[in-house]
Image: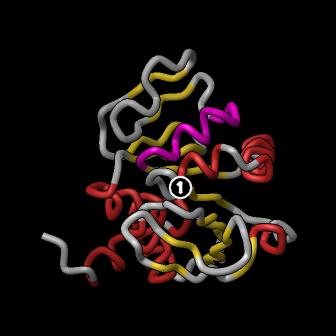
Amino acid sequence: MAKVLVPLADGCEELEAVTIIDLLRRAGVEVVTAGLKPGIVQASRGVQLVPDASLDVALQDDYDMVVLPGGMPGAAHLKEDARILALLKKMAAAGKYTAAICAAPMVLAEAGVLDGKQATSYPGFLDALPGVTVSAAAVVQDGKVLTSRGPGTAMDFALALVEVLTGTEKRRQVEAALVRP
């Protein structure tokens, strides 16, 4: 079974975080949510999220993928956290998946993960970055890096993550149970 880390920072976009966590768990993926600091995470619209562990504890395990929810100032907090940047570099160097949505692809860029890659983000967050080819697609996969635009693309993004980790058939099963049009 694949194991995924979803770091949660104060000011994260709750729709993105919960959609990613929910759909991955529906697919049977082990998801660990980790707060940058101990305790409850206050999301961007006031929803309170209770992480499974602190980031320091979560970093004691290995993961197949790290997924960063966006939202502001949540993505900025992720970008300012040396532990997150080190983890992203380590994951990329090991040939493992990194993923981010909305404003959070800027964190991948800060860690050097997007160098020479095609990516997407919330409009304006990747503009003028050398070495990154910016796309307006809802979801972009370039090798082991997946990015997405924002809250409106969260379900498509989460389903793409499901497919990468568990295969096309499992994605179809999860999507069918959601009764999407």
Residue 180 vs 112, above or below: the answer is: below
Specify the segment rendered in magenta.
102-113
- Viewed as shown, does residue 150 lie left or right of 51? left
Instruction: Name the quarter where the C terminus is drawn.
Output: bottom left
Residue 68 vs 59, above or below: the answer is: above
Residue 150 drawn in magenta: no
Residue at 42% over, 58% down = 160
Q: Could you tell me if residue 169 is visible in this image?
A: no
Say which of 135 and 72 sits in front: 72
Colour mode of the rendering: secondary structure
The image shows residue 98 at horizontal and vertical percentages of 62, 50
Q: Could you tell me if residue 173 is visible in this image?
A: yes
The disc labelled 1 sits on which kind of residue? Gly
Residue at 65% over, 59% down = 65
Asked which secondary structure carries label 1, the reply is: helix
Extreme residue in the left direction? 181
- Viewed as shown, does residue 16 lie left or right of 2? left
Residue 13 in which image quadrant: bottom left
Residue 106 drawn in magenta: yes
The image shows residue 19 at horizontal and vertical percentages of 40, 71
Instruction: Name the quarter where the N terminus is drawn.
Output: bottom right
Residue at 56% over, 15% down = 130
Residue to which mark 1 is pinned: 74
Say which of 64 and 73 sits in front: 73
Residue 169 in which image quadrant: bottom left
Residue 116 vs 24, above or below: the answer is: above
The image shows residue 115 at horizontal and vertical percentages of 62, 25
